[in-house]
Amino acid sequence: MNQKPLDDLTIEELKKQEKILKLTSGFLGAAILIITSTGIFLTVVKKSFSFFNLSALCFIPIFIMNVNNLKKVAAEIKSRNI
């Protein structure tokens, strides 16, 4: 997906993107916590290592990218609200 540079977006588009990034980051963070806690629970109960322990690692890079993009969008909004 080709994204426009943040400089080309209007304030309304930036605020919409910020809202979407906050929502998706929250869901990803919650999913990571749920998957990690489920993996730990399954490891303790079954006393064996399961795929759930590793599956949360797949979401961490996406979460980090979302948080970084959210910071960039917030900085752009702040720079325009002078």
Image (tube, helix red, strand yellow):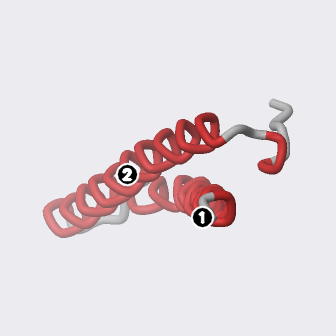
Q: Residues within 10 Å of mark 1 (few under 14, many from 20)?
A: few
Name the image quarter holding residue 67: bottom right
Callout 2 secondary element: helix
> In the visual, does 47 lie left or right of 5?
left
Q: Which residue is mark 2?
A: 26
> In the visual, does 6 lie left or right of 34?
right
- Position of the N terminus by quadrant: top right
In the image, residue 78 lies at what x, y percent? 60, 64
Q: Relative to the observer, which residue lies in front, 68 or 75?
A: 75
Mark with earlier residue (2, 1): 2
Task: Using the image, determine if residue 30 lies above or below residue 8.
Answer: below
Q: Residues within 10 Å of mark 2 (few under 14, many from 20)?
A: some
Task: Report the amino acid beneath label 2.
Answer: Gly
Task: Report the amino acid beneath label 1.
Answer: Lys
> In the visual, does 2 lie left or right of 14?
right
- Position of the C terminus by quadrant: bottom right
Q: Residue at x 36, y 64 (%)?
A: 49
Callout 1 secondary element: helix
> In the visual, does 6 lie left or right of 78?
right
In the image, residue 35 lies at what x, y percent? 33, 53
Q: Are marks 2 and 1 in contact (CB under 8 Å)?
A: no
Q: Residue at x 19, y 62 (%)?
A: 41
Task: Using the image, determine if residue 21 lies above or below residue 75.
Answer: above
Q: Foreground mark, 2 or 1?
A: 1
Q: Which residue is mark 1?
A: 78
Q: Residue furthest left?
A: 45
Q: Residue at x 54, y 57 (%)?
A: 63
Q: Relative to the observer, which residue lies in front, 77 or 25?
A: 77
